[in-house]
Amino acid sequence: MSTDRGTVDTLLIGIDACSQGILEPLFEDDHVPTIQSIWERGPSGDLESQIPPWTASAWPSLYTGTNPGKHGVFDFLSYDGYDWGVANASAVDEHSLWELLDYHDKRSVVVNVPMTYPPSKINGAVIPGFTAPENPPSHPDGILEAVREEIGEYKVYPTPGGETAAFEEYVDSVSMRSDAFRYLADRFEPEFGFVQFQVTDTVFHQYGYEEEMVAEIYEAVDREIARIIDEVDPNVTLLVSDHGLGKYEGKEFRLNTFLREHGYIETTRSAAGMPSWQTVREQSLRKGEEKTTREPTMLERGVATASNFGFTTRRIGRALETVGLDGIAKRHAPAGVVKASDEQVDFAASKAYMRSRVETGIRINLEGRDPAGVVSQGEYEEVRDELIELLSDVTAPNGEPVFEDVARVEEYFEGPNVERAVDIMTIPNDWNYFLSAQLRDELFAPPSEPWNHKLYGIVAATGPGIEDADVSGAHLLDIAPTVLSALDVPRSERMDGDPLSVVSPTDEMEYPDRKEGMRKSTDDDDVEDRLADLGYLE
């Protein structure tokens, strides 16, 4: 039962990619006293993420309490046939927490949560996070301008790059989230508050594991969590992450290279193909208009050679930046340099392919479903069985199986949107193998992202409204019904999770279907560049 206390009754704090393996050394060196206090004095433990454990799909799973087969987001990208765009909240087909609370006339303030652009029109305020444009339309109209007038600068994305000044923007972004949230909480006095810190994930994608940088980022997050809790005095506080993060001990496995070797993939350099660092910047490739017929230059051949040793064009660009040559490269060889290492999958002519590594699986080019499907309905299950058997036997150079599981997609997802997903899930062994969609000469290489997503994040609960309970076995899908129960609101019967025993469960009820609008991608080159820079688009 909720009680009247401070400005916010139930507070949800998201720390992207946080895991026990990240927290333990920070605890040992006393870098995060607030988080450590929450962790040690109340129920806490692992929070199992969904498959695949990636930001764009996991946060909708957390805030809707439904699996991707229901809510419809499987990747940072959404697909229309063989075309693609950056996914956003228009692709989420299930009600968010704040929409369900709005149904019961409860106010919410939501700040920086991924996949919330375009924002819901609720009683309260929403400032979107990841995959929104830099100056996102927020709710209510004019609220982002009011936030900036009150707290000063507010940016969705810190400036990417390897320089110290860029890292300082990462640190500064933490206080921006906190200042915005506390201002909005004071202004709207919501029953529910949700603030997310994305930079705890992006710092690893941008810099790898740099102990001092990680400590500085987490110290900043810890300070702001303390300020938020002190100011809004919540009855219930839940600290959660969408997935974990850790070192990949295995190799990078290039799944499309494997499929090409076994005759499933046709390739092209002159038509629309899989998303890559190149196609993000060369938009005409989506329409098959770009043609490269000239001989490659020495620089281009060098890029192609480097790519076979695990260097992506994104990292080559970063290296050029550090020595001051990035401007020259962009001016004099912007297309050729990138294309040199990017032979593409020809979607329409191939039998099966990995569209994007984030999807963690293989899509079959199915007749009647895909625009130029080459696999007939009658062949479909036979092709699936062939691929499952073939991939289940793949071993790394050390003899270890690359995959923990290779299975039909319906073994992982259920709901009306399963058709949007891949057909075969390819789950890396202990999430130690980096799956890549890139086509290269070598099948295995050192992982392009040595520190990356893992299956287990964290959950911790504190506050007068929290009961002492065991949270072992907690799942990402349990968070939404837990929040609703904490606020004495019936949870949706469509939810796949259950309330954690830290609160008394409420009953289920049937809510109206979410009104489906047109799925629109985030049409913003800067957002696509950002995703590419962080390794989500290869």
Image (cartoon, rainbow, N blue to C red):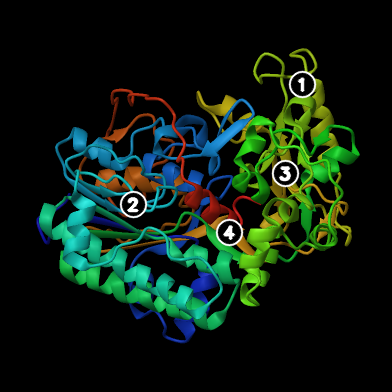
* Amino acid type at image mark 3: Asp
User: What secondary structure is found at the residue carrying circle 3?
Assistant: strand
SS category of the residue bearing label 2: loop
Of badges 2 and 3, nearer the viewer stands 2
Tell me the amino acid under the disc marked 1: Glu
Vertical position of residue 350 compared to residue 444: above or below: above
Q: Is residue 481 left or right of residue 292?
A: left
- Label 2 or label 1, whichever comes before in sequence order: 2
| Badge 2 or badge 3: first in the primary sequence | 2
SS at mark 1 in the image: helix
Say which mark, if any, is on residue 405: 3
For marks 1 and 3, the one nearer the N-term is 1
Q: CA distance from mark 4 to mark 3?
A: 29 Å
Residue 180 visible? The answer is yes
Q: Tell me the quarter of the picture where residue 319 sits.
A: bottom right
- In percent of the image, x 16 and y 69: which residue is there? 231
| Residue that protrudes farthest toward the front in the picture | 332
User: For mark 1, what is the residue?
Assistant: 381
Q: Position of residue 315 (x, y in %)?
A: 67, 64
**Label 2 sits on what residue type?**
Asn
Q: Secondary structure at mark 4?
A: helix
User: Is residue 60 or residue 148 the one in the foreground?
Assistant: 148
The residues bearing labels 4 and 2 have C-alpha atoms spaced at a distance of: 19 Å
User: Can you identify the residue that label 2 sits on?
Assistant: 135
Residue, x 67% and y 38% (percent of image)? 355
Mark linked to residue 309: none
Residue placed under numbered mark 4 in the picture: 533
